[in-house]
Image (cartoon, grey):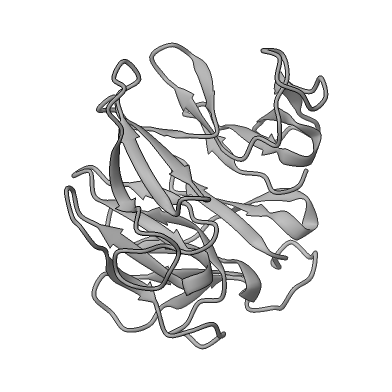
């Protein structure tokens, strides 16, 4: 499983995108094998096939999976466009797509994004965007024309004031930001309005032991506060119990 992302359901089922195999795999908690939930029929464009799917979430109302994009309880759909370096929002029944982050080409200004990026939509419709090649996390308030740097932004590196190819991002109930710091093979916790973060997973280098990561790509929390990390270089999803108090 490579370049995967995941969704954790209330029943502690992990649904992970298996990008290279063009499928979505569902894993029950503590099981030793998964089940194909979507795709798995090769790379094509028929309705039974997927093509390098990159993200997955669950539609709790209809009990189905929405693949590649991000949906929130207010009914909006958020889509990342890597080529245009922007995030757009719209309702599925509406054709009016609003740019809510980026949209000003590739770059490092506060109104730009660069590289792969993931998003986390907060309750107030503000959006946290990991900005891979700018090595930072941006926060875009609702209707804002530019973002605010809330983590990193000091060039690539491994100090606690820096990120290196930040990709996955999540925010807990205390407004603390968690970042998959991919090229540093670690998960960083960054409270609001501080100048540096702290390491919560992997101070042990790029390896395959249970307490180590290799090119961490994405992360999320379940309702019990467990942290799930896509450990991309080791082809696995790891679960960690961490103190978020």
- Find the residue positioned furthest to the front: 105
Give the vertical position of 200 relative to 144 (above or below).
below
Query: Horizontal and vertical percent for residue 73?
Result: 29, 28
Give the residue displayed 53% in from the left and 52% down from the top.
Answer: 219
Give the vertical position of 133 relative to 7 (above or below).
below
Give the residue displayed 24% in from the left and 50% down from the top.
Answer: 126
Residue closer to the observer: 132 or 184? 132
Q: Quadrant of the N terminus?
A: top right
Query: Horizontal and vertical percent for residue 68?
Result: 55, 34
Camera sees residue 227: no
How many numbered circles are shown? 0
Q: Quadrant of residue 67?
A: top right
Give the residue displayed 78% in from the left and 40% down from the top.
Answer: 20
Give the vertical position of 89 relative to 244 (above or below).
above
Q: Quadrant of the C terminus?
A: bottom left
Query: Horizontal and vertical percent for residue 21?
Result: 80, 34
Camera sees residue 44: yes
Give the residue displayed 33% in from the left and 72% down from the top.
Answer: 109
Query: Horizontal and vertical percent for residue 101?
Result: 32, 52
Residue closer to the observer: 12 or 87? 87
């Amino acid at each position: 499983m490579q370049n995967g992302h995941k969704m954790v359901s209330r029943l502690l089922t992990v649904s992970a995108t298996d990008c290279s195999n063009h499928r979505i795999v569902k894993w029950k908690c503590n099981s030793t094998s998964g089940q194909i939930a979507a795709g798995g029929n090769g790379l094509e464009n028929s309705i039974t096939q997927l093509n390098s799917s990159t993200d997955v979430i669950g539609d709790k109302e209809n009990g189905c999976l929405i693949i590649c994009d991000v949906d929130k309880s207010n009914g909006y759909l958020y889509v990342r466009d890597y080529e245009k370096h922007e995030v757009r929002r719209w309702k599925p029944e509406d054709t009016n797509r609003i740019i809510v982050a980026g949209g000003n080409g590739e770059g490092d200004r506060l109104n730009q994004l660069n590289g792969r990026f993931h998003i986390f939509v907060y309750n107030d419709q503000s959006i946290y965007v990991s900005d891979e090649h700018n090595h930072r996390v941006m926060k875009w308030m609702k209707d804002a024309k530019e973002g605010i740097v809330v983590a990193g932004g000091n060039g690539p590196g491994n100090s606690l004031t820096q990120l290196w190819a930040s990709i996955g991002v999540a925010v807990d109930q205390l407004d603390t930001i968690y970042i998959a710091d991919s090229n540093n093979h670690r998960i960083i916790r960054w409270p609001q309005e501080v100048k540096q973060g702290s390491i919560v997973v992997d101070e042990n280098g790029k390896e395959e032991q249970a307490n180590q990561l290799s090119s961490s790509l994405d992360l999320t929390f379940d309702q019990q506060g467990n942290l799930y990390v896509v450990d991309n270089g080791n082809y696995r999803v790891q679960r960690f119990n961490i103190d978020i108090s």
